[in-house]
Amino acid sequence: MFKKFIEKLKSLSGEHTSFDPASLNDPLAMQTEWSPAKGGGANFKTHNLVQITPNRIEFQASTGAKLFYLIFALAGVAVLIGFPVASASSNEIAFNIDTIMPMLIGFIFLCVGSALFYFGTAPVVFDKTKGYFWKGRKSPDQVAKKIMLKSIADLNKIYALQLISEYVRGNKSSYYSYELNLVLKNGKRINVIDHGNQEKLRDDADTLASFLGKPVWDAT
């Protein structure tokens, strides 16, 4: 309990314990980068790890993440529907900058929210049957060129799982976001997910490590 209290105080102050990769006693750890592979991140849990079959496990968007994405889309829909209705009821419909701008803003919110939902809810898959890790709704055998997939890796080339943290400074609040990366045998890293729930991400990393038979390098 005392340890968690200290970690909470460090989080509030922006202080974080430095990590020495030499402590892993692994030459590849010394060659691997330990800065964030993907800048930024959420301050809440964006994904849940789900066992689909004995040979397939994947990260799926959390309910909180889906609601967050939908807020943008629904705000856009509300403006696109609500503004014309309000204008019609007051007999003030006219095509000018005062009417076009709110509609344009509503359309932008709808597009942004729809894009966030589509890409944010795409599964992050580890499939032993196919032998690959990938991000997206299409598996490697469903695309003409594997390079077309956003992220892909041969499971046999995964060397370790890396956990690192990033202190994200915002205009109104600051927080830690925790990142799970794959470390390949050549030292290259591929980001898997990035969110604000450290405890859950650690648990998911341990589950994934058992599934893959790989170690976890925890620098959080």
Image (spheres, grey):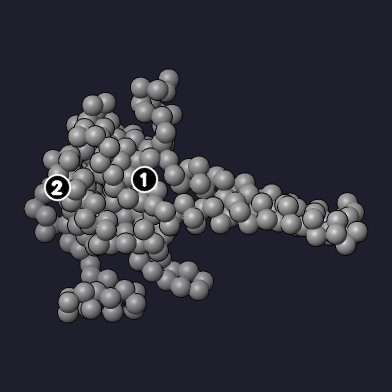
Q: Is residue 111 visible?
A: yes
Give the Cα separation between the discs numbered 1 and 2: 22 Å
User: x and y percent of residue 49 in the render?
Assistant: 29, 47
102 vs 10, left or right, is right
The residue labelled by disc 1 is 60
Query: Between 130 and 217, which is closer to the camera in this rendering?
Result: 130
The answer to which image quadrant residue 153 occupies is top left
* Figure check: 1 above or below 185: below
User: x and y percent of residue 178 in the render?
Assistant: 32, 59
Which badge, 1 or 2, comes first in the chain's sequence?
A: 1
Query: Between 45 and 166, which is closer to the camera in this rendering?
Result: 45
203 vs 80, left or right, is left
What's the amino acid at mark 2? Answer: Pro
Query: Between 217 and 27, which is closer to the camera in this rendering?
Result: 217
35 vs 40, left or right, is left
Per the rendering, the mark at residue 215 is 2
How packed is label 1: few (under 14 Cα within 10 Å), some, or many (20 or more)?
A: some
* Figure check: 74 above or below 148: below
* Figure check: 54 above or below 43: above
How packed is label 2: few (under 14 Cα within 10 Å), some, or many (20 or more)?
A: some
Secondary structure at numbered mark 2:
loop
Secondary structure at numbered mark 1:
strand
Q: Is residue 157 visible?
A: no
* Figure check: 120 above or below 145: below
